[in-house]
Image: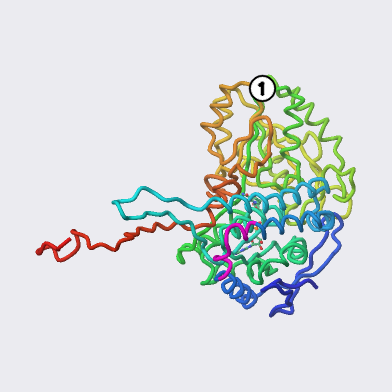
Amino acid sequence: MKTHYINGQFTSGHSKDAIAVDNPATGDVIEHVALGTAEDIDAAVQAAKAAFESWKRVSASERAELLHEVSRKIRAHAHQITELLTREEGKPVSENEEEVVWTYSTFDYYAELGRHSRGRVIPSTEDGVLNMVIKEPYGVVGCIVPWNYPLLLLAWKVAPALAAGNTVVIKPSELTPLTTLLLCEVAFDHLPPGVVNVVTGDGQTGEALVRHPDVPMIAFTGSLSTGQKIASIAAPMMKKTHFELGGKDAFVIADDADPELAARAVAYAALINAGQVCTSTERVYVPKPLASRFTDNLVDLVRSLNLGDGLDPETDIGPMIGDKYRQKVVDHIADAKAKGARVLVGGGVPNRRGYFHEPTVLADVNHSMKVMTEETFGPVIPLMTYTDFDEAIRLTNDSIYGLGACLYTSDAKKVRRFFEDVKAGTIWINDPLTDNYAGPFGGMKYTGGGRELGEEGLDEFRETKHVHWDIEARPKPWWLPYHKKQPQ
Ligand code: NAD
C-alpha cells in the first residue's frame, strides 16, 4: 500500500483503511493508498506550517533554482510517470506525454515568474515617506485536485504557490493518487521537509483540509457541487478560495468555415481524454446551410477512431475514469433520445472490460436536454443548427457555466463579436483547447473566478500589503491634541 507524504517522509498515517486504485482500461486494481483522516491532515498541516517559517524567507532566486530542479527531475522520470499516469487515468499515452511536459514546464515558468514579480514602490504621500506594495504568501495552501489531469492541475497550483513562498498540503483525487505520490518520490524529495505534503484520501479527507484552521487558502479544481460545499465551509472562516469548477463549452462553426477542418477541430475539442476535460466541447452550433457537409465529415471521422487501452499507441480514445461517470453519459444520451435526438454514430457501451463508452454524435438536440445544459464529461458531441450569428451567440451564453468557448471562422467581424459578447474565461478561435503558460486560464459564472497560469496565476497565491513608512519618524501637524498647535 502507498502511504502519505508528510514532512519529507512516507508515512502510513492514522487509518488502517485503504482505497483501491484501478486501471480504467481493465477495471483491475493496480494499487492501494491510505485513506487519510483528519489527524493525518493535521500532521501534514503542522509540517507545512513549520516549514513555512523558513520557506517564506528563502530568496526568490534560491526558490527558483529549487523549482527548476523539480522540473529537471520530472523530466528525467518522464517515461515512468507517463506510463503510471496512463494506467491510473486511462487517456492515450501521447496525451499523457503532453501532460507531463506541461507539468514540468509549469515549474520552470513559475520559477522564473516568481524570481522577478515582487510588488512595487508607489508615489509617496510626502517627501521622506516610502510607500510600498508588498506581495506576500498566505501560509499553508490546501490544494485539492481532480482526476482528469492530476499532474497538470497539481502543477498549476503547487508551482505558483511555492514560487510565492507558500507551503502546500495536496489532496489528490482518490481515483488518481499514484502519480502524485510518484512525484514526491522522484521530484519533490530535494525540497526542504514540509514544503510539499500529500495526504491521500476521499472527499472527507479533502473536507478536513478545508476545515483546518491553520489553512488560510484552498485552491480547488473539481465539480460545481463539491466547490459549493467547500465554499459553504470556507466562507464563514473568511478563507481565500480559488475555484476552477465545471464547464459546458460551446463550439460555434461560422458559415464561412471549411466543413472538413471544422469537423476535425470539433472532434479533437470534444473527444480528447474521452471528453473528460473541463474545457471539452460539449455543445456544437452549426449554421443550417453547412450542417449536412459538416455532419458527414464529423461522423466519418468519429467512426474511424480506435477505442482502446491508452498504453496502445494505436488508441485514439481511451476509457472513461469509472462506471459512475460513464453512467452519467448513458443517462444524458437516453434523456436526449427520449426528447427527440438522433444518434448518428456510437451511442452505446461496448462489450469489453474497462469503463469504455463509444464516441457519439447526436443530432436534433435542443436546450431542453441534459446533454445541452448539464456537464456530460464524456465522449459525446451534440449538434444543433442555428439561423444567424446572433442566435449562435445567444445559445453559447445560455449556460450557467463560463469556462471556455470556441469559434471556427476567418471573418474578423465575427471574431470580434464573439470575444466581446461571449461570457467565458477563454476564447479559442480556430485552435481549440490550446493553452499558453503566460495566458490566464479560468472561468466566469458558475465555473468560479479562479485563474491559473500567467501572472494572474501567481497573484492568486499572494496577499497584498501596503507599507507606509516615514523614514525620519517626524511628528505630524494633524495628530492629537487638536486644540494646541504642536511644535514641528
Ligand atoms: P470532484 O469535485 O468529485 O472531486 C475533486 C476533488 O475534490 C477530489 O480530490 C475529491 O476527493 C475532492 N472532494 C470531494 N468532496 C470534497 C469535499 N466535500 N471537500 C473537499 N474536497 C472534496 O471532481 P472530479 O470528478 O474529481 O473532477 C471532475 C470535475 O472537475 C468536472 O466537473 C470538471 O469540469 C472539473 N474540472 C474543472 C477544471 C477547471 O479548470 N475549471 C479542470 C479540470 C476539471
Residue 281: image x %, image y %? 68, 39
Near-viewer residue (419 or 362):
419
Q: Is residue 175 above or below residue 382?
A: below
- At a point 66% along the width and 74% down the height, the residue shown is 7
Near-viewer residue (60 or 418):
60
Say what secondary structure mark 1 lies in: helix
Q: Is residue 290 above or below residue 483?
A: above
- At a point 82% along the width and 45% down the height, the residue shown is 94
Q: Within the image, what quadrant is residue 84 found in?
A: bottom right
Magenta residue span: 54-64
Q: Which residue is mark 1?
A: 288
Give left or right: position of 145 versus 389. Answer: right
Secondary structure, magenta segment, majority class: helix
- At a point 30% along the width and 61% down the height, the residue shown is 472
* Quarter of the C terminus within the rendering: bottom left
- At a point 70% along the width and 72% down the height, the residue shown is 8
| Label 1: how many Cα within 10 Å (few below 14, some 14–19, many 20+) | few
